[in-house]
Image: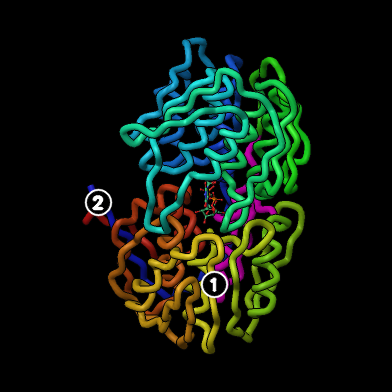
Amino acid sequence: MLEKLVIEGQHPLKGTVEISGSKNAVLPILAATLLTEGTSIIENVPRLRDTLTMIALLRSLGKDVDFTKNTVTVGGNKPLKHIAEYKLVSTMRGSFCVLGPLLAKLKKAKVSLPGGCVIGVRPVDLHLKGLKSLGVKFEVDGGYVIGDGPRMKGCQIYLGGVFGSSVLATANLMMAATLIKGETVIDSAACEPEIYDLGCFLSKMGAQITGHGTPRIIIQGVKELKGAHYRIGPDRVEAGTYILLAAATKSTLTLKNADCSQLVALKDKLEEHGVELQCELQTIVVKPKFIRRPTSITTYPYPGFPTDLQAQFMALMANTPGVSVITDKVFPDRFIHIAELNRMGAQIRREGSIAVVEGVRVLHGAPVMASDLRASAALVIAGLAAKGKTEIHRVYHLERGYEGMEHKLQKIGAKITRVKE
Ligand code: UD1
């Protein structure tokens, strides 16, 4: 049954939002449990459609998985299967990161190609290039990549791509390298905090790994890995989304369980715009100031401004008088939200990988269509800031990445309800 969100805009928001565990950290960490027969316990796992998809995929590969409250336990001693099916991989690209662990563990894997999505073509050439360097032979048949690597061994790999480093290609390669002979050096590795987290989890499993979180990761293969106990850190994209939502609605909000140190690019840009972030331990207080300046951003790999906050930042700029320029260097086609924001009275035009935003004083509520996860969050922000009623259709995209969003918003005073279509 399709559902929509109905938002009455321009209600003042106030209070505290608890940030959930990081979706993008948990997906590769769940995939890493394939590397061992031991039992792993992962805490602070957000209950999202994407985490449920990864759990379904692990079960389909032979794992026993329990998900109680926010803790996932993965174990079981059934033999591992090597085929990751289309119906689970096609709904979520993150599923493709089972390829590395399956190859490490079974020396063979057959994983559905994830295909493109509305944010762009999203190739997997870097994943395959890296794994080929380790000695895997690939063929593509019936929409699947079939990898065979009986004699995989470590080597030095340059993993930089046209759009910079790749997060999930780095994850795939790190996991593949843990259980093979010799030393693997990954140069131009992704430096995202989620890769750092994966490295910490692999270390706890007994992997010999250094440099995770930097552009050079070094892995010394070991014979076997054991289960590990790990707590997932806060979701920086969810935190960033609530920060931008506070800025757009001119509300003072407190975020609990948030890590400001992972949001330096956003903090810097918001200071330029006119929003102060007060960071203390695991708490961020967002304080919009009276003056709001149009502010330009360009997305880059971490620690640059995250592409996963580009749409939400655009919603804020759409409602900030003056001209700002938004460039996406990571996903140059990630602009499907422009048309929907324009339906709310925004004035944004796209020129290639650049969006020129002529900010308006007031946005107006309208029926709009969610197209992907972060674009949906941008529409929620715009709807909360706009005058009148906004209806967001196809809201299921939000459930892929935001745990209990409407409940969190209702708690801080937002007029938002979920209605059956
Ligand atoms: C991850 C995140 C996603 C985020 C993205 C960029 C997860 C589950 N998803 O996706 O939320 O938006 O990082 O921060 O962690 N590329 C290639 N060849 C490849 C792989 C990637 O050209 O083989 C390109 C992509 O098309 C894109 C850029 O590299 O232009 C970065 O993509 P990548 O870091 O791989 O994104 P994901 O890991 O899929």
Give the residue type that dot 1 points to. Thr
The stretch in magenta equals: 231-259
Residue toward you, 200 or 16: 200
Residue toward you, 91 or 220: 220
306 is higher (above) or lower (below) than 77? below
Image position, residue 250 (x, y; %): 56, 76
Image position, residue 361 (x, y; %): 47, 88
Left or right of 337, for residue 133: right
Q: Which mark is residue 327?
A: 1
Residue 388 seen in the figure? no
Give the residue type that dot 2 points to. Leu
Residue toward you, 198 or 254: 198
235 is higher (above) or lower (below) than 106? below
Q: Residue at x 62, y 41 (%)?
A: 170
133 is higher (above) or lower (below) than 13? above
Which of the marked residues, 2 or 1, is nearer the chain's N terminus?
A: 2
Q: Is residue 117 magenta?
A: no
- Which residue position holds label 2? 2
